[in-house]
Image (spheres, grey):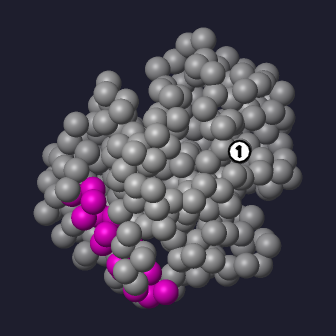
Amino acid sequence: MLHIVHHSDYVAPPPTRGSFAFDKYRLVMEAVKELSDKHMVHAPHAMERHWLEAVHDPDYVDQVLSATVPYEKERRIGFPVSAEIAQRVRFTSGGTWLAAKLALEFGYAANSAGGSHHALADTGAGYCVFNDLAVSANRLIAEGGVGRILILDLDVHQGDGTASLLAGRSDIMTVSVHAEKNFPVRKARSTLDIGLEDGIDDAGYLELLSSHIPMILDDFSPDLLLYQAGVDPHRDDRLGRLGLTDEGLVARERYVIRQVRGRNIPVASALGGGYGHDHIAVAKRHALSMLTMADENSRI
């Protein structure tokens, strides 16, 4: 059973400028329903303002929530922040937190959005407004439900915002496996960064994971994994640079779940990146990613 978090406000009206495909989140849910009837949808609450301000600069939070983000910050984000988008990012942040709470109950759960790993303290960047991974990790630990969280970022782009926001914390470990020559040009410092050469294939990628993930899990011993499950390492991704196939992404998800759930660690995934001119194909990659992880979780 796939426990998936979704809210109607995840699908915001398209902004007046920018190339981000906001219809992806509707298409992802349609793809999930098409591929499987073994799923349960959970609706999140909007993330409370004080939790956003615990990670992001309060002035920036106010700019977003009042839809008064300066133009230079909107350019860095990649689209203007309307009132609808401000509402959306509160729900997607709440969705990652809820997925984590469900994972603690069911072993694995997914947010059908989120993974906004480029957002920094006082600005958004790279299609990311609030950093739901950092906000949710901070909140989960502050609430006392978990003591140590590993954020594993397998998106093709480095999780620079997550690394920056959580730098120096001993209770949260950030690991980013990304294309070294891809965005962002200036990388932040995660707890562990693994930069990949362009074009790495399925076998090379999985070999690299197998040489690092077991040791990371055993050494850090997290109580929870927040997994940035971007599908943009796919060879056909418009913003990728790597060479994974559909089969490679499926193998990646099965490997991650086996390693993590085999150690009895709950996993909550965020959608992360996936870009292409064929929006339906991208949505199906995301849907298959989540359904694969749910299936593998059921085998543990």
Q: Which residue is mark 1?
A: 91
For the C terminus, which image quadrant? bottom left
Q: What is the magenta range?
A: 248-264
Q: Residue at x 60, y 11 (%)?
A: 16
Residue at the extreme front: 37
List x then y, in percent, for residue 176: 41, 59
Asked if the magenta segment contains residue 253, the reply would be yes
Q: Residue at x 68, y 29 (%)?
A: 85
List x then y, in percent, for residue 113: 55, 46
Between 12 and 274, the one nearer to me in the picture: 12
Between 263 and 247, the one nearer to me in the picture: 247
How crowded pointer 1 is (Cα within 10 Å; few <14, some 14-19, many 20+) is rated as many
List x then y, in percent, for residue 254: 31, 69
List x then y, in percent, for residue 14: 58, 19
Vertical arrangement, residue 191 with respect to residue 128, above or below: below
Type of the residue with mark 1: Phe
Residue 71 position by quadrant: top right
Secondary-structure class at tag 1: helix
Is 142 left or right of 260, judged from the image as shown?
right
Asked if the magenta segment contains residue 18, the reply would be no
Residue 237 position by quadrant: top left
